Image: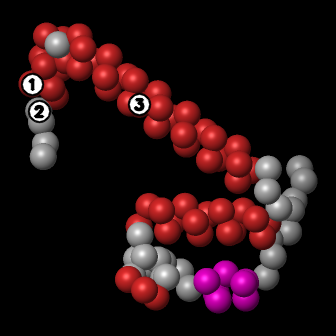
Amino acid sequence: MFLEKDYYLSILYSNPHVISHIITRLSADLLSAENKLMKIVNLNATGRIAEILLLLEEFYGTNGHSDTIKTTLKKKISAIWLEPPQKLQFG
C-alpha cells in the first residue's frame, strides 16, 4: 500500500503516539541490525559465511523439508570461488 507523503505526514502530526511508535520500532530495528553486523564482523571468514547463510534463511525462509533457502543468487557461488583474489594496491 502506498500513501502520499502529505497524507502520511498529516497522520503523523495529528497523532503523536503514532510518531512515538514508529520511532520506537525504527530504533529497535536499527539496534537489531547493528547487533547482527557486530556479530558478523567479529567472526572469522567461515563464521561470517555461516552467519550470513543463517540470516538469509531467517529472512527468506526455506523450501519445505529440503532446508534450502528460498531465493535466487545473482551470481553462482562456484564462480565466486573460482575468481582470482583481488590484489591490494596502496597509493
Main SS class of the magenta portion in the image = helix
- The first of marks 2 and 3 along the sequence is 2
Verify CB contact (< 8 Å) between mark 2 and mark 1: yes
Query: Of the residues shown, which amino acid type is indicated by label 1?
Result: Tyr
Vertical comparison of 15 with 8: above or below: above
**Residue at (46% x, 37% y) in the render:** 29
Q: Which residue matches tag 1?
A: 7
Let me know if residue 68 is in the magenta part. Answer: no
Residue 77 horizontal side relative to residue 13, left or right: right
Marks 2/1: CA–CA distance:
5 Å
**Residue at (31% x, 22% y) in the render:** 21
The span picked out in magenta is 77-83
Q: Position of residue 89 (x, y in %)?
A: 87, 59
Q: Which residue matches tag 2?
A: 4
Vertical comparison of 64 with 33: above or below: below
Of badges 2 and 3, the one in the foreground is: 3
Q: Which residue matches tag 3?
A: 26
